[in-house]
Amino acid sequence: DFRLGMHIKGLDPKNPRLRFYNAREYAPRLLQRDNVILLGTPTSNPWLRWFETSLNFAAKSQPPGTDPIINRSPRPGEKEVYFSKDRAVAYCAIAYLPKPDRTGTMLLIQGSTSEATEAGGEFLLSEDDLSAFEKQLHVNSLPYFEILLTVSQVLGTPVTSKIEAYRIYPHPQ
């Protein structure tokens, strides 16, 4: 998660509004004031629990490294639970949504492993991946969305990721 945070910071290193906090140092007033990016799982970042009910795809806290991703409304061909049976495959849920109070946006990246969280960040930071997703949706700009990625990994390093399932939501008027 730290590497992903540094990569995000590297996109605009001099931006004074881009601040990083350890989950234990974060305060509720910041959620009300700013757009927010949260990384990890509810175990590593308890702030994610505030948004759980807004999500279709959400990590469920389990013993470290085994966090399954829950699919609250499976569509045909989708599973209700995505769970890693071995260390070669993991999952990442990404959500880009309005904050529940509609005062801004939130970006949540929840991996079943830290490597999956990193892969989710790489997906979002890849112009090719986001462009391919836009083409899949037949849109010119991304709507609010949730994506579930399947991540192949080797020796703790994410290698590839593919979209397993997604949901799109209209921007509120």
Image (cartoon, grey):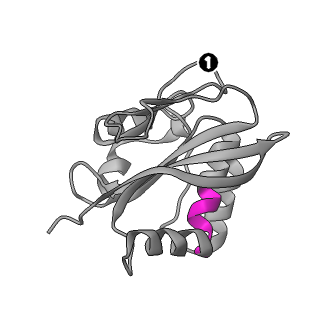
Query: Which residue is under mark 1?
Result: 63
Q: Position of residue 112 (x, y in %)?
A: 60, 35
Q: Is residue 61 above or below residue 38?
A: above
Q: Is residue 150 above or below residue 106?
A: above
Residue at the extreme bottom of the image, as rendered? 140
Q: Residue at x 66, y 50 (%)?
A: 118
Q: Residue at x 35, y 48 (%)?
A: 31
- The magenta stretch is 121-127
| Secondary structure that dominates the magenta span | helix
Q: Residues within 10 Å of mark 1 (few under 14, many from 20)?
A: few
Was residue 62 drawn as part of the magenta stretch in this picture?
no
Foreground: 73 or 47? Answer: 73
Q: Residue at x 52, y 65 (%)?
A: 18
Q: Position of residue 9 (x, y in %)?
A: 62, 65
Was residue 124 drawn as part of the magenta stretch in this picture?
yes
Q: Is residue 39 above or below residue 42?
A: below
Q: Position of residue 130 (x, y in %)?
A: 53, 70
In the displayed structure image, the side of residue 103 where residue 152 appears, left or right: right
In the displayed structure image, the side of residue 41 where residue 71 appears, left or right: left
Foreground: 34 or 108? Answer: 108
Q: Is residue 63 above or below residue 172?
A: above
In the displayed structure image, the side of residue 29 where residue 77 appears, left or right: right
